[in-house]
Image (tube, rainbow, N blue to C red):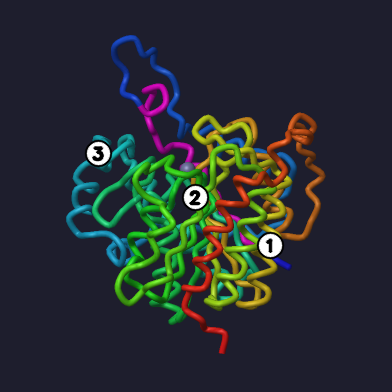
């Protein structure tokens, strides 16, 4: 088993400002780091380095996404607007701030997502993890949103379809926020099944409802699994077992891309979920198993959000251990605090939400023949 790994130090240079969260400085708001600070992903990368786990993976080169690759998903006008702001920095749309030269970094982030998918599809590695920044799943064709500039996973999926002529790709996004951008890119495209598990009406607050299931000609190829705040490992695994895995079985993707956000973690400042590193480990295992069953193990994890600088590194390491099948020797020191949380068990109101979402599986196009 070989796992491709992408991280580039320059992802830490993506400058989201000192506006204290996502607010501009001013009034009584003392300047402070943004939620999307370099700390979370940087500390994940550092843990991989210090534990020497990077030596157990294949370091994949990354190059910036080309304009053509970006324009397969985004509009000319949007790309031009960003290029015009590259020297000064600015806001790509809604809460998507970047500093000078930020567009070059965002192109590298999208390029890393493509690189992970290409390496898997070329058979250079069995699977891959691209730790990228900025994230991508909120970005829409013509605007950035929610810390996202380019739609990294969508751009990579587009390459899989166009360059490798795949007929079907599934994107499973377990970032705590709705994958609105990914859903909108493939809304009318029956070749991509988008599945989003997220905290019910968190961000964007007006999207991610179960009723959003795909546009004309692509009915059933968008699945939304809104989960109540407070859902932990038990609820997420129930959703994977009863919605995501059966949906993949029907759709039979030739590649699975995971939108790997860790902001459903038990310590995240922007989510109210209770997933532990053990939960992310089990979720990853189920997706790796699904990839083995349906697409010769072809799976690529593309990093999305996750804002607990304390905990993201250990959640990430659990995922990498599952991808490689190797033990890093790193123990999650926080697990002792979370192990007895009652929220880790499936609660009745969480089961109810999964029950409702499970009805969507019957509408997924059936490619089992
Ligand atoms: Zn998120």
* Residue mark closest to the camera, 2 vs 3: 2
Quadrant, the C terminus? bottom right
Residue 50 occupies which quadrant of the picture?
A: top right
Q: Residue at x 17, y 55 (%)?
A: 77
Quadrant, the N terminus? bottom right
Q: Residue at x 44, y 57 (%)?
A: 210
* Residue mark closest to the camera, 3 vs 1: 1
Q: Which residue is mark 3?
A: 87
Q: Which mark is residue 226?
A: 2
**Element class at badge 2:** strand
Q: Residues within 10 Å of mark 1 (few under 14, many from 20)?
A: some
At which x and y percent is residue 152?
42, 56
Q: Which mark is residue 286?
A: 1
Residue 125 sits above or below residue 316 on the image = below
What is the CA distance from the residue labelled 2 to the residue labelled 3?
A: 39 Å
At which x and y percent is residue 180?
38, 53
Judge: label 3 CB < 8 Å from ligand 1.
Answer: no
**Of marks 3 and 1, which one's residue comes earlier in the chain?**
3
Q: Which residues are magenta?
A: 3-22
At which x and y percent is residue 293?
67, 76
Q: Residue at x 58, y 63 (%)?
A: 243
Q: Residues within 10 Å of mark 2 (few under 14, many from 20)?
A: many
**Of marks 2 and 3, which one's residue comes earlier in the chain?**
3
Residue 246 occupies which quadrant of the picture?
A: bottom right
């Amino acid at each position: 088993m070989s796992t491709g790994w992408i991280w580039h130090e320059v992802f830490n240079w993506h400058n989201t400002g000192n506006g204290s969260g996502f607010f501009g400085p001013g009034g009584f708001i003392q300047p402070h780091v943004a939620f999307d600070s370099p700390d979370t992903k940087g500390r994940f990368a550092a843990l991989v380095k210090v534990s020497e786990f990077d030596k157990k993976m294949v370091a994949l080169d990354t190059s910036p996404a080309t304009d053509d690759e970006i324009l397969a998903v985004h509009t000319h006008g949007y790309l031009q607007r960003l290029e015009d702001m590259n020297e000064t920095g600015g806001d790509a749309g809604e809460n998507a701030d970047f500093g000078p030269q930020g567009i070059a970094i965002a192109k590298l982030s999208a390029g890393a997502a493509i690189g992970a998918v290409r390496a898997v599809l070329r058979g250079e590695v069995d699977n891959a993890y691209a730790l990228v920044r900025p994230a991508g799943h909120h970005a829409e064709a013509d605007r950035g949103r929610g810390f996202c500039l380019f739609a990294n996973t969508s751009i990579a999926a587009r390459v899989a379809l166009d360059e490798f002529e795949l007929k079907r790709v599934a994107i499973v996004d377990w970032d705590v926020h709705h994958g609105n951008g990914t859903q909108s890119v493939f809304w009318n495209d029956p070749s991509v099944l988008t599945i989003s598990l997220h905290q019910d009406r968190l961000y964007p607050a007006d999207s991610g409802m179960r009723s959003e299931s795909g546009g004309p000609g692509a009915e059933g190829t968008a699945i939304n699994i809104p989960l109540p705040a407070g859902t932990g490992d038990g609820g997420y695994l129930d959703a994977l077992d009863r919605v995501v895995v059966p949906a993949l079985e029907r759709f039979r993707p030739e590649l699975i891309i995971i939108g790997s956000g860790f902001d459903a973690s038990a310590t995240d400042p922007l989510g109210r979920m209770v997933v532990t590193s053990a939960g992310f480990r089990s979720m990853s295992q189920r997706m790796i198993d699904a990839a083995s069953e349906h697409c010769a193990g072809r799976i690529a994890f593309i990093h999305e959000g996750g804002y607990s600088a304390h905990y993201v590194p250990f959640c990430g390491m659990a995922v990498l251990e599952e991808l490689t099948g190797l033990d890093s020797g790193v123990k999650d020191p926080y697990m002792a605090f979370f192990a007895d949380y009652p929220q880790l068990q499936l609660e009745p109101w969480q089961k109810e939400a999964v029950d409702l979402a499970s009805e969507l599986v019957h509408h997924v196009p059936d490619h089992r023949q």
